[in-house]
Amino acid sequence: MVSKRLLLVLLSILLISISFTVDAQCSMCRMAAADSDYANGLNTGILYLLSAPFVFIGLVSLIWIKNKDKFSGHEF
């Protein structure tokens, strides 16, 4: 059990420490914003809006997994 937890922690640290550039613009947005000063802000905004649903679903899943045993023995 400890080795699985250690592996999970090490893998999480590895994934967090790796950084790379992501371009989230579609080809039409890229062409429209290519000659403007706000292209970097547009890309950051797209990535921010993309990450919000993943964080929300992750939090709901975490709460569900932690609390699923509380209600397993009850019949309504």
Image (cartoon, rainbow, N blue to C red):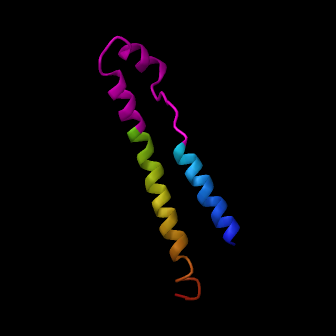
Q: Which residues are magenta?
A: 18-47
Q: Give 15 or 22, whichever is nearer the viewer.
A: 15
Residue positioned 41% across, 20% down in the render:
29
Q: Give 29 or 43, whichever is nearer the viewer.
A: 43
Residue positioned 52% across, 47% down in the render:
16
The percent coordinates of residue 3 (x first, y second) are 70, 67
Snapshot quadrant of residue 6: bottom right
Residue positioned 30% across, 22% down in the render:
38
Q: Name, please, the residue furthest toward the left.
A: 37
Q: Is residue 43 magenta?
A: yes
Residue positioned 36% across, 17% down in the render:
33
Check the picture and name the quadrant holding the N terminus.
bottom right
Snapshot quadrant of residue 37: top left
The percent coordinates of residue 25 (x first, y second) are 45, 25
Q: Give 53 or 47, whichever is nearer the viewer.
A: 47
Residue 63 left/right relative to 6: left
> In the rendered picture of this protein, how many numbered marks are placed on residues?
0
From what the image shows, is residue 47 above or below residue 76?
above
The percent coordinates of residue 36 (x first, y second) are 31, 14
Q: Is residue 34 magenta?
A: yes
The percent coordinates of residue 65 (x first, y second) are 55, 70
From what the image shows, is residue 61 above or below residue 23?
below
Residue 15 left/right relative to 59: right
